[in-house]
Amino acid sequence: MTRLHLKEAAAHREIEAPASGNRARRKTRALELGVLNGHVGYFVRRFQVWIFQDFVRTLAPFDIRPAQYSVLVVIDANPGLSQTDLANTLGIQRSRLVRLLDGLEGRGFTRRLPSPDDRRSHALFLTDDGQQKLKRIKTLAAAHEARVKASLGAASRNQMLSALKAFAIQGKRRNHRPSI
Amino acid sequence: MTRLHLKEAAAHREIEAPASGNRARRKTRALELGVLNGHVGYFVRRFQVWIFQDFVRTLAPFDIRPAQYSVLVVIDANPGLSQTDLANTLGIQRSRLVRLLDGLEGRGFTRRLPSPDDRRSHALFLTDDGQQKLKRIKTLAAAHEARVKASLGAASRNQMLSALKAFAIQGKRRNHRPSI
DNA sequence: TATTGTTATACTCTATAACTATA
DNA sequence: TATAGTTATAGAGTATAACAATA
């Protein structure tokens, strides 16, 4: 307890100090991350936020967010799939997918057709317009991906991608829950 | 357009098929990820969600979430820092940090003391109890991290960590905004 | 004028539970 | 009984704008 207080006091003093170490007036202290340096999750999260920001910015002309993009892509790659299958594939809640599809359908990207063999479920398709727009969307997404690659370095990017894919595949065995 | 419709029809037929390829009755189709396979962001996001889920589950005895953990750790490593410095370090909004600290302070983890050299700002500290609890919290967090390492493989995990750190450091030069 | 902490608002997203109509 | 789609709710998190006190 005593030691802790001394430690606090010392650090407190540190910010009281002139802090003229760098240049004119130091605006931000150099901060320690402590044990966060040993947590992959911390850096993964920061990276993910940055990626999403860049994605949203890049896709702004189409007003498409990452989740919407993944929905469009998977429907395009698996026409006629059900909402449950789509939700499970993407690791999102069925209930969340409903509003996601409502939005995309309202904007003319997707359609819900009656499933031919189960009257409870829908068969999902892209509209013709949705298909055409998706092509252009994919071009912008590719530009985004190039930026990711550049900011990470091609080698690291490729290593990371295969490591994460291995994790994802392994995850299918890990549990059967919607989230990975 | 014709080709697209044919493609749709073919896939549609696929789900109409008996689908008895695997075992008794196939519950979920094997779905294609399409171009998502080329997007790091998709897999990073899935990984990040899994990590957070595991973290929350592991830290449940202390009811501590990732953001709260990172706040505690950085205050512990930089006693007396200001809210703005903390927010910038973690890449979160100043406005978000307010409620985060309200919660932690209400639970006796942290304290806001008046800054000695700027009456606008606060100097943040852990309470004695907060320090003691954080030690035990770190133990659980380490167990979580071991699980991350195991599910990723030690080699991939280390590569990923250093690649993400390099990205984060580079990001400090990239822009001065709070988000990385 | 600029910055610090704060309040407020809008959206996105995760997590759950429950309901209906089908199976 | 179980499943598909849906509705509703709670909470976390991002993004943004504005305000009072202080620099």
Image (cartoon, coloured by chain):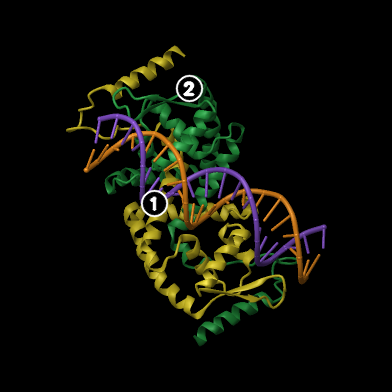
Chain colours: A yellow, B green, C orange, D purple
Residue that badge 1 annotates: A50
Q: Is residue B118 above or below residue A144?
A: above
Mark carried by residue B71: none
Please tell me in which quadrant of the rendered image residue B83 appears. top left
Badges 1 and 2, same chain: no
Would residue A5 be found to the left or right of residue A28 on screen?
right
Please tell me in which quadrant of the rendered image residue A11 appears. top left
Residue that badge 2 annotates: B127
Could you say whether the residue bearing mark 1 is in a helix, strand or loop? helix
Kindly identify the amino acid type of the residue bearing the numbered disc 1: Trp
Q: CA distance from mark 1 to mark 2?
A: 33 Å
- Is residue B32 at least partly visible in the picture? no
Q: C8 or A65, which lies in front?
A: C8
| Disc 1 residue crowd, few under 14, some 14–19, many 20+, Cα 10 Å | some
Q: Position of residue B125 (x, y in %)?
A: 42, 25
- Residue visible at 35% across and 57% down in the picture: A149
Q: Position of residue B10 (x, y in %)?
A: 60, 81
Kindly identify the amino acid type of the residue bearing the numbered disc 2: Thr
- Residue visible at 32% across and 43% down in the picture: B169
| Disc 2 residue crowd, few under 14, some 14–19, many 20+, Cα 10 Å | some
CB-based contact (under 8 Å), mark 1 and mark 2? no
Q: Position of residue B133 (x, y in %)?
A: 54, 25
Q: How many marks?
A: 2
**In this view, the mark in front (1 or 2):** 2
